Amino acid sequence: MDPLWATIAEFWWIGPTTIGTGTLGWLGLRRERRERRRRIELDAARLELRTAKRDAATARAAVRVARAELDRLQAERTTGRASAAEVAAARRELDRATDEVRVAAARARSRRAHVSAARAALPPAGDDAHLPLARVMSAHDEIIARWMTYETDPARLIAFPAMTDARQPATAAFLAADQVARQHRPATAHARVAPARFTAYRDAVAAAGRAFAVAEAEAWRQARAAGDAPARPQPGDPDAGSTGAPVREQWTIIAQSLTQTALARGTEALARVVATRTSPTARAAASSGTGSGTGTAGDPDADGGDGRRVWPVPGRPRA
């Protein structure tokens, strides 16, 4: 037998073993990534809790340092080597450090509650539709969709122009917050993101939601002040007003009312123009060829006695 084939026959099991090991490794890596996506919110909450605990420990150390500095200055004050102003400044620094400890402790308690909430909200294994990143991206998409209705709905565009005017401070603040959220947004809900990036994106989406609520409330306030807005919808129901009637129908009525008002004003302006052209002074000036002033009918700059300009009436040229 050929030595090469003899070697292959002796070590034939290496190939299947390598393939099997690689397959198992790939499946394990895929499962690990899926589990990481499922626990990303919990991991982010734990990271925030560790950061809050570290900040609280730093704040407590700063309190100890400030208290020791105050004790030193008070002791030196008795010997005249420290002034009253220095002692007062040290006492203010101790008070500030004590306030920082209270804030850091409250933040740590809040982060601990976030960890418990994230653990309770863990989606079941294999439920890709309710992954934490997918939920945040869905909330971001909902905010964008709500704002886009003010851009694409003609009735809303007429009734609430402040929502599309970047010169309005509240609208500009929302657009800036949404831009920050877009910068932190991953490509897909299955993208690999670190807990810190997930936290940044989640906080940016929450800030954009708050800014949108402020901008929407300001737009409704301006519309109500102008008398062009229907009743404000109840919270959580953007399509229903306080009376239960659909707001979209009210917006349609508003757009029709504004259109009728514009047509009525245009008709009145046209009627005034026609009345001016057909006034007795203008007809007399047109028939006689001269105005009651010093101008002539052939002169476009001639005016009548009432100060209005009289234009000649066109006639058929003679042969």
Image (cartoon, helix red, strand yellow):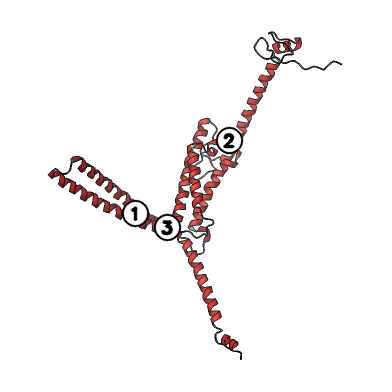
Q: Earlier in the sequence, mark 3 or mark 1?
A: 3
Q: Please name the residue that numbered disc 3 is placed on.
A: 44
Of 156 and 314, the residue lying toward us: 314
Residue 265 location (% of width, % of height): 63, 25
Q: Amino acid at mark 1?
A: Ala
Q: Which mark is residue 108?
A: 1
Is 158 situated above or below 315?
below
Q: Earlier in the sequence, mark 2 or mark 1?
A: 1
Whole-Å distance between the Cαs marked 3 and 2?
43 Å
Question: Which residue is the extreme one toward the left?
Answer: 79
Is 281 situated above or below 14?
above
Residue 162 location (% of width, % of height): 53, 36
Is 195 situated above or below 96?
below
Q: Please name the residue that numbered disc 2 is placed on.
A: 158
* Residue 154 visible, this angle: yes
Residue 250 location (% of width, % of height): 58, 37
Q: Amino acid at mark 2?
A: Ile
Instruction: Determine the secondary structure under disc 1.
Output: helix
Quarter of the N terminus within the rendering? bottom right
- Mark 3 surroundings within 10 Å by alpha-carbon count, few (fewer than 14), some (14 through 19), many (20 or more): many
